[in-house]
Structures are given as structure tokens and as C-alpha cells.
Image (cartoon, rainbow, N blue to C red):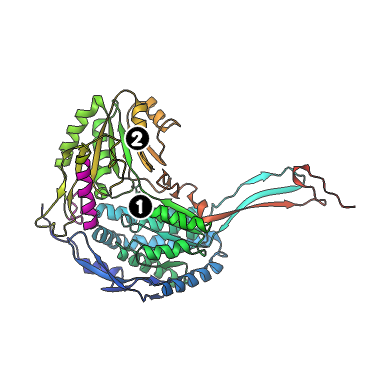
Amino acid sequence: MATAPTSFDIQQVLFQLGIKPVNLGTSTGIERFSTGELFDSYSPVNGQLIAKVYATTAADYEQVMEAATEAFTFFRTVPAPKRGEMVRLFGDKLRKNKEALGKLVSYEMGKSLQEGYGEVQEMIDICDFAVGLSRQLHGLTMHSERPSHRMYEQYHPLGVVGIISAFNFPVAVWAWNTALAWICGDVCVWKPSEKTPLCGVACQNIIREVIQENDLPEGISCLINGDYKVGEMMSQDSRIPLLSATGSTRMGKSVAQTVAARLGKTLLELGGNNAIIVTPEADLKMTIIGAVFGAVGTAGQRCTSTRRLIVHESMYDKVKHALIDAYKQLRIGNPLDENNHVGPIIDKDSVAQYLQTLDAVVAEGGKLLIPGGVLSGEGYESGCYVQPAIAEVENAYAIVQKETFAPILYLIKYNGDLPNAIALQNGVVQGLSSAIMTNNLREAELFLSTLGSDCGIANVNIGTSGAEIGGAFGGEKETGGGRESGSDAWKVYMRRQTNTINYSSSLPLAQGIKFDLN
Ligand code: UN1
């Protein structure tokens, strides 16, 4: 189905967000520079060049790290609620720029406009959350075993926090990290994905206004750009006590090893292979909406996307036919046209991986119920539009064990009782998100119990994607173990200190040890 290449004025959006045809990709907050190579950002929507960005060199990186380190010496002394005020002002700016930034996200990354706006809303939500949190960075007080002693713990800022983010959430994942890190008193250096550098430049332009208008220190929010080599500079840099990285498991393993070798901390949010279990007591209509949005939303490129549907044999045919019917109604096309459900995937490499995965499914004996394929013709000139596919498979297939960042949904049958389905759901190396569709309390509680899902996120009668910012976000096993966003995820951005104060006039030792002089 053909639609207009863009249903909005991209030039106006770029102007509002301060994006030029050629952009300096390195910034220490206010100052912008870059001496590296120029690289392009193409839109998967229509294949057109949006703008160019200069990459960060090793010398540029040094300048950024000096500014960040310097800014930290001041920023750590600013009271946390005052740092919260800065985040509140940032949230206000995001509200003003929601439409433009949402459109840029949609145009540079390819997700639907609704999801582009949703992503900016997620940034606003985390700012609000962080503002409140800035008055709640609580530690505990505990009773000392010694008389007239007081013992408590407190949290101090860590230092320079590095953030490596992925193309699929080009702005929100930075905001999850940076809004929390700032209220915790840290300063941030951000490397956005080289596939969505303009979203990074736009965000930096927005925070730059907050820094300038409020005389905040340059260096609290820095931007660097480029490929994995720039990421390696961060991994190796002992001036970065915490590196938060979102992306593939392969990238995460490399970052984790390098950072661990210098005993730094990582916060990893890596691949998922998320399943929805559909029991005999599931509501069919809710199941179909949850599964289809989970599988084709963001064109299957969320780490929380639904990859596997594990359906009880008694429901299997019903679910299969309802899914096929639903997929036939999907409108694939320009994501800026709100009539469309599914936009393009990020680039042609990704299209090639999608096609290889479909071949591998067939080679292992799977059956394609909706065969998929690359769309061509008017409106599809970028070559990045693919048909969301459904395949009947076995969970044990090697290809099913892997995460393919594309709209491919695997349909898997289970027989007998719920523990069989849970075993399949847990029978992958990843552990991010999971869900069960059931109206049976016993099934729901078993799924959430210690014998149930082994994932960081486990939902009942909701799909696998679309988590709210208030909960801790992240997963187990090869997903990396990190937790970002809500709940007490802030603690990873701070160092904990235990303090014991003696207000007696003697010096008793812990564990009753006697040590007398004279
Ligand atoms: C991601 O795909 O990296 O839960 C993040 C969700 C979104 C965040 C996804 N709130 O689907």
C-alpha cells in the first residue's frame, strides 16, 4: 500500500530541533565540536539522507572526559532536590518538543508516529519520576551491637556515567539513565547508536538549553558519536565507574568483559526472546491484541517484542486462525501516516537478517503460516519494509533460540499442564520479558511463583512489551541482569557507604574482641 513519503514537513522538525545538514557529533554540554569522519543518517522511511554527523575522535573524547570529570567535582555538591529541579526543567522542555522529537524518532528510526510520541512521553515520565526521587534517595539506619553507637548507610554520587544506547529506543533509554544519574549527582557521557545519531544531537540540543539558561556546569551532559570503537574507549576508561549499555548480547558480553577487567560496574540491558503463554483459560480477544502488538509493534524491534507464542493444544487452532486473520488486516507503510500499523525495519542489513532467519526456520523444518517477504513498489522504495511473518516451529530449533530483531512470530504448541509451557518459556538463553494469558488465578500465580517465569518481567493478561517507567526494567540470563528506570534502579548510579558513629567515651570493638593497652 502506497502512502506519501512523509506526511509532515521534515525541514521544520529539523529546524525546531536545531539539526543542520552537517552536525558536530561531540558536545561537552554547551560547546560542540568534532574532528572525526563524517557519517550519514538515512531514513528507513524513504531511504533519503536526513543529515550528516561528525564522529568523535580519541582527542575529542579526551576533551569530553575532561569536561565531564571537572563538572562532577561541582555537581556532586549540588543538593539532590536542586538537581531534581534541573530534571524538572528538562521535562518541561521535552513537553514543548514532544511533537518534533516524536516525529524525528519516527523518521530516523522508522517506528510508528504513535510510538515515537510514546517514546518522548516515556522520557517525560522518567523525568517526573526522577524529580520526586530526588527527595527520596534513602539509606537505612540499623542498630549497632555496641552501646552508644549509631550505624546507618548513605548513598553518594558515583562520577561519570557512560551510556551506550541502541537504535530501537533512540531517546527514551538515554533519558531513563540520564534522568536518574543526574538526580544522583552523576554526570553523563552518551553514545547513541550510529544508526540514529540525529536523535542524539536533538536531545543534546534540548538539554543544552537547560544548561545554558540555568548556568549549570558544562560537562554534566556530554554527547559522543560513532561506531563500536567509540564504545570501546568508554569500556576501557577507568574514569567511568559505571557503563550502562543497551543492545545485543554480543555487544554486552564484550562491554562486560572489558569493564570487569578494570573492576568497573556495568548496567546491561541486552537481548530478549520473549514469550506469551496462552492457556486454555485465556481470553482470545485480549490474547490476539497483546500478541500482535507485541510482535509487530516497532516492527518487532523492541527488546521486549513478543517472539514466541506458546499455546495450549486445545486453543492452538483457534489462536492460529485468529492470528492469521489479524495479520491480514495489518497496514504496512510510512510510519508517519497514522493509518499504518507497521513501519520499516532499520536498514538493509536488518532486512537481510530477517530473510536469513525465515530461510533458517524452513531449513529446520518450520512452517511459514504467513511467509513474510520484502515489500516493493510505491512507498516502499527504501527497501526496508517487510511483511510481518508467522511460523510454526519447535522451541528447540537453533533459530528459535536466537533473537532476530524483526517482526517474526513463532507459534509453539504445548500439551498437558502449565509447567510444560513454563519449561518452554524458560528454555532459552535470554530472560527479559514474559507473559501469560489466563483468567485462572492458579495458573497466573504459578506463572509468577518461583516455579514460574525466570524473566525480569512477568505479566498477566498483558503482552511482553510496553513496560511502564515506574517498575525496574531489565532481565536475567543473557539479557544481562541490569535494572533501569523505576523502583530502586537508582541505587546502581550511586555508591553506598556504611557509617558507624561512636558517641560513647570508650572504644568497644565489634564481635566483643578485647584489645586493651596497659
Ligand atoms: C527496549 O526495547 O530497549 O517495555 C526498551 C517496552 C518499552 C521499552 C523497551 N517501554 O517495550
Look at the image and give the residue range highlighted in magenta. Answer: 334-361
Asked if residue 106 lies left or right of residue 252, the reply is left
Give the image location of residue 518, x and y in percent: 90, 52
Asked if residue 260 lies left or right of residue 197, the reply is right
Residue 217 seen in render: no
Q: Residue furthest top?
A: 416
Give the image location of residue 60, x and y in percent: 42, 74
Q: Residue furthest front?
A: 363
Confirm whether the magenta stretch covers residue 341. Answer: yes
Residue at image location 31% in from the left, 54% down from the top? 168
Residue at image location 43% in from the left, 56% down from the top? 255
Label 1 near ligand 1 (CB < 8 Å)? no
Q: Residue furthest left?
A: 377
Which numbered tag is attached to residue 248? 1
Give the image location of residue 164, x and y in percent: 40, 59
Confirm whether the magenta stretch covers residue 336. Answer: yes
Query: Label 1: few (<14), some or many (≥20) within 10 Å?
Result: some
- Which residue position is annotated with label 2? 425
Residue 80: quadrant of the picture: bottom right
Q: Secondary structure at mark 2?
A: helix
Q: CB of mark 2 within 8 Å of CB of mark 1?
A: no
